[in-house]
Image (tube, rainbow, N blue to C red):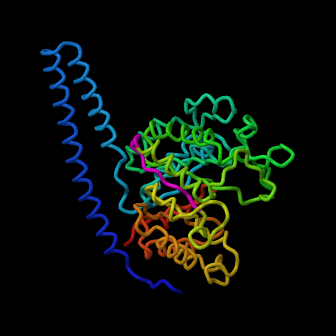
Amino acid sequence: MLYPSLDPNERFRDRRKNARRRKRRRRAAVAGIFLLAVLALAGGMTLAGKSGKTGADTGTRAASQAAAELRVALRPRPLPVEIRGVHVTGALASIPGKLAEYQAYTKHGLNTIELDVKDEGGEIAFDPGVPLARKTGAVRDYYDPRKVAREMHRKGIYLIGRVVVFQDPYLARTRPDMAIKRRDGSLWATSAGLEWVNPYDRRVWDYAISVAAAAARAGFDEIMLDYVRFPSDGDVAAAVYPGRTSVPKGRLIASFASYANERLSPLGVRVSMALFGLSATRDLGIGQVPRWISRHVDQVHPMSYPALYTDGELGIASPSAEPGETVFRTLIDFKRELEGSRAQLVPWVQDWSYRPEQVMQQVRAARLQGAKGFLLWNASGIYTKSALAPPS
């Protein structure tokens, strides 16, 4: 094996110390902004006394702006020293008591939950207040986002909202003018029959980020954008992209990341993106270039599931038989690609079809590579609780 059996305790303590230091600085900044808000309001009152309505309006605007800056400064909430989380679908969250069951994982070490806002089927877990979302029929009543955010924060849990972007059967069928087509004009779909919307269409960008913004305003700490790529499953050669330009796929996807960050960051959330595990190793032809994307996001989540790698990838005869080594080598490539960017690495860990020890091998590999943490993925929502324990 390439990675040694090292004790990550020292690195873990250093991260905790740095996190506390950042928290103190943030509190000082918030206090300063609050003082500015008070002074601005006082200035507005003074101007009102001297100059009438114009002065009052100026002071009110200044106070409002300072108050808005204060709200943003209070968010996003601090990242856990080490992210240890699980994936939860909207449908699972709709089951009475199910979210409380996942929240109880805190006793095993969990500090993060990734909750679907808009999933790979195009369903939206709550009404985001976007008229087009209602028109598509994608809106569900799986959970109350504000109530969930409050409860998660009360439990000390960092909340990530996952928003699937370009695989969206509901939007494609309702608005075929926004969809990827076939040469005969019909809707293109994957081998599983799922339609995609057009990455070149800026209206699609607006739709996905408007849904994401609703989650941000509800109190989610981070928005994770997924399926931010061109399709890879099905007859991709038959896909037709209306309005296609000469912009390379990788540059287009990086531009989307920039657009998402510009719209969401002012709402006080972190912005992250899930990427294929091999996207840092070679060009997959889907537009995911970690080096470019990482310039615009706070975190990158490599989907380093060993089951998705073919034999021989990364120089490993059978990646699925060596889960720890697969994650370790994947993160070597991602660290190289992200060098110089602000983005942190938080890989997805495969928690299906493996024994607990094999899940732990992946977790240890992430820690040895200095990742900011990890997220466990199992579509059925059944997790290896022991893998959530902090380093000991």
Left of 375 or right of it: where is 378?
right
Left or right: where 73 falls relative to 147:
left
> Taking 10 as reference, is 106 left or right?
right
Residue 96: quarter of image: top right
Q: Is residue 311 above or below residue 267?
A: below
Q: Is residue 380 visible?
A: no
Using the image as rendered, state which of residue 17 and residue 61 is in the foreground: 61
Frontmost residue, 60 versus 271: 60
Please state the extent of the stretch shown in magenta in the rendering.
266-275
**Can residue 2 be seen at all in this image of the molecule?**
yes
Which residue is at 72% across, 47% downward?
196
User: Residue most toward the front?
Assistant: 246
* Quadrant housing residue 49: top left
Q: Is residue 306 above or below residue 134?
A: below
Q: Residue at x 57, y 57 (%)?
A: 251
Q: Residue furthest right?
A: 184
Up/down of 127 relative to 317, above or below: above
Residue 254 lies within the magenta run: no
Taking depth in this image into account, of 157 and 342 the one nearest to the observer is 342
Describe residue 63's horizontal placement relative to residue 146 as left or right: left
Residue 337 x %, y % = 49, 70
Could you say where residue 57 lies in the image, as x and y percent from the top left? 26, 19
Q: Count the numbered circles shown.
A: 0
User: Most prominent secondary structure in the magenta stretch?
Assistant: strand
Q: Is the C terminus in the top left, top right, bottom left or bottom right quadrant?
A: bottom left
Q: Name the spot of residue 216 as percent of width and height, x first.
A: 46, 40
Residue placed farthest to the top in the image? 52
Q: Measured from the top left, where is residue 54 in percent x and y?
A: 23, 16
Q: Residue at x 54, y 61 (%)?
A: 376
